[in-house]
Image (cartoon, rainbow, N blue to C red):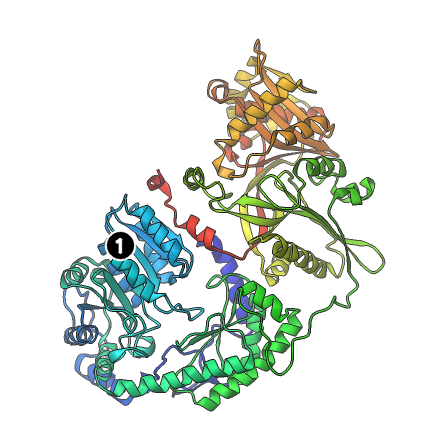
Amino acid sequence: MSNLIPLLDQIVNDGRAAGVGHFTLEDSSLGGRTLTLNGRNALNFGSCSYLGLETNEALVEGTIDAVRRYGTQFSSSRAYASVTLYGELEERLSAMFGRPTLVTASTTLGHLATLPVLVGDNDAVILDHQVHASIQMTVQQLKARGIPATIVRHNDLDHLEKTIRQLKPKHEKIWYFADGVYSMYGDSAPLAEIEQLLDRHEQLHFYVDDAHGMSWTGTHGVGHVRSRMTHHPRMVQAVSLNKAFAAGGGAIIFPDQASAQLVRNCGSTLIFSGPVQPPMLGAAIASARLHMSDGIVEHQEKLALRVAHMNKRLNEAGLPQYAENDTPLFFVAAGLPHLDYELVRRMLDDGFYMNAAVFPAVPMKRGGLRFTVTNHLELSDIDAMVDTMARHYVEALDDAGVTFDDVARTFKIPRFEVRGRKAAQVAEPAATLWCERATSVDAFDPRDWDGHARGHGNFTHAALRRIEDVFGGSTPTADRWPFHYLTVRDEVGNVVLRTFYTAARIKDDMFEPAEVSQQVEAQRAADPNHLTSIAVMLGSMATKGDHLYLDRKHPAWRDAITMLVEEMEAASARYGATQIMIRDFVGERDVALENAMLSLGLAVAHLPDNHSIESLDWEDHEAYVQSLGRRYRSDLRREILKNAEAFEVRTGKMTDAELEHAFALYQSVHARAFELNVYELPFELFRAMHDDDAYDVLRLHVKGEDEAVAVMFSHFEGDDYNAMFVGLDEDAIERLGAYKQILYRTVMRAKELGASRLDLAFTAKLAKRKVGASPQPARAFVRVDDHFNAAVIDALPRGARAA
């Protein structure tokens, strides 16, 4: 989560700036139907109090009575004492659900009390990809104990059962965690099928969070889950006493008294957290009485009428729901956060309050309008809201250059048309920029291309010609890449942007810790494409450097970036890619560029530090040594220079046998290089580099031995010497410090050839600092349209437990 904090902060700040978040109400009293925000009155389509019971007279009186009898709080851990009202509430809830029930201070604290107690060290857990964040947070505690956590695709029962079968031989119990009603899109778990799985697999246990399903359906308001399945003997259910129940706290419903008592005795948040306080206990008891009476049916039927009417009106308007259902939580698909915020702002300006569902609660491009129906609203309120939404939806998409078909493709929903006026298909803007496209570097005059590329990395015209020969293909794989070249010019022909991008299969754990990639690689033995995906990326997996030429002084540079992203999006759709990556940016943050990228849905991704020596202007070797810090001077002498006489340095062309041996040394390093986990590059690339005069191949031989023990392939044109690929003999690393030695010799070689700057690339920070390199932050801009693989990787254990 920590790496998401800057991005999340930016997205929330953007929402605040758009006037659609972090509101403080201006009402002196509330009735449930309207709110006052920014001086305007708005109908409330953002409340989760679905039955509207927060103003129910019985609940209000229950609250007042509890305060008068027990005060505003009872300040004691439940491990010591509980206020009288607790016992009555738990008895009433146990009667409602027909199972032992514990009240917790919130649903989230209920998860934290229950799951670490009931899930044993020999168990395994499976999470639905969209299970609520509060459960995902609790699973981190289980992972810390070494309990394996596996993610399955949302509501994919075949994937779930396959995973159950894989886990059964190794684990005592297998827990499946899901929501009854999912809080963003409002869709439901396939409960009937899950019940069948429970019957088929005796090791399977089901933990379900029905916070959004409580009260508005089921006998006595037992909720969405219990209205569609019995309380299975291996099921534990969590509910909210907020939302439709209209009080405070949460509750956990157990299959038996022994489980309930175990959690009561051992649940950490029942021991160390504060309790639900008397006012809310009083409200909850009054709500439980109402739920156990026939009176709850009238409230449920009233809401069901409103839900059905909302579905009818949305369908009539043609507004695209992600999943139509009978829950009071709705989601209309839109897209990127700026579009979602614009829709919410427009609706609020016209008197309708609702929520934007944006990243990270949903994937970056799959946000939209999240709104609810409560019994406070009239049918006429729904009519007015839908009519207004339809108008704004069309206009906002037009203004953003988004078509209905764009939305349908992004969300993988049927094509739709919002009634009243078809959204205009967006033509090329009447702007002054235009694109030139090519699929090979051969389309460019070498001098023209190199005027922007030379000195920025190993992608000069000649270098790319060779790389295309090795990797070019029409279908993206790990070693065949479609190449695309883009030039954006202004009206007089000046180049505003120039770059190239490729589509390729990449490993989704590329930048994960080594311990994680080792686990993933073990799984890839059975499935080579496990946790891999197609990416459309700036540059290629065989190039490094500043791939993006962008004239930042040009007034239309942001428009040029937009055109680049649109081109990459089109390629992504063509190749079935699930992510776009614009890389590599080294050095200090570029806030203006970050904001431009974020508006297009690309978030900053922090890469491993890049290491470079920015100046090689020392006069002689002693001056070089003195340029290092005192500590590193000592390390250089003790760890590197003391072994220098053991090696012979060779450059120049190699025989076929020598080249094959150099490639074998590269393979040896690649097999251990989990810190940057990428596919092995083919021998043909190393042959191409060897034959290209712009590459320098440095070899170290132990004196008296024929075969090299270290090799460095580097690109050198202009003033920059770029170390690209290293190969090492493992024994020589241990005996003679061959890796540090090849780094040192690379510095000497760059100086010898007259380079003014040396780039030593990623990873191995300490070793590179010892030869004078300084780390610089590196980043890319990334948009992932399918977060499933990332969730699976995040669920893998870290630290000592990973072994």
Q: Residue at x 61, y 68 (%)?
A: 405
Q: Is residue 217 left or right of residue 346?
A: left
Q: Is residue 632 left or right of residue 475?
A: left
Whole-percent x and y of residue 579? 56, 53
Compare residues 620 and 2 and report the one nearer the observer.
2
Q: Residues within 10 Å of mark 1 (few under 14, many from 20)?
A: some
Whole-percent x and y of residue 724? 62, 33
Q: Residue at x 17, y 68 (%)?
A: 100
Query: Of all residues shown, which one is farthest toward the top?
Result: 704
Q: Is residue 551 above or below residue 635?
A: below
Whole-percent x and y of residue 669? 52, 29
Q: Is residue 168 above or below residue 195?
A: above
Compare residues 53 and 22 and report the one nearer the observer.
53
Is residue 535 at least partly visible in the picture?
yes
Which residue is label 1 attached to?
Answer: 201
User: The N terminus appears in which quarter of the rendering?
Assistant: bottom left
Q: How many marks?
A: 1
Compare residues 325 and 719 and report the one nearer the observer.
325
Q: Under tag 1, what secondary structure?
A: loop
User: The C terminus appears in which quarter of the rendering?
Assistant: top left
Is residue 108 at least partly visible in the picture?
no
Q: Is residue 144 left or right of residue 331?
A: left
Identity, as a three-letter code, of the amino acid under mark 1: His
Q: Quadrant of residue 73?
A: bottom left
Q: Is residue 9 above or below residue 65?
A: above
Whole-percent x and y of residue 651? 67, 20
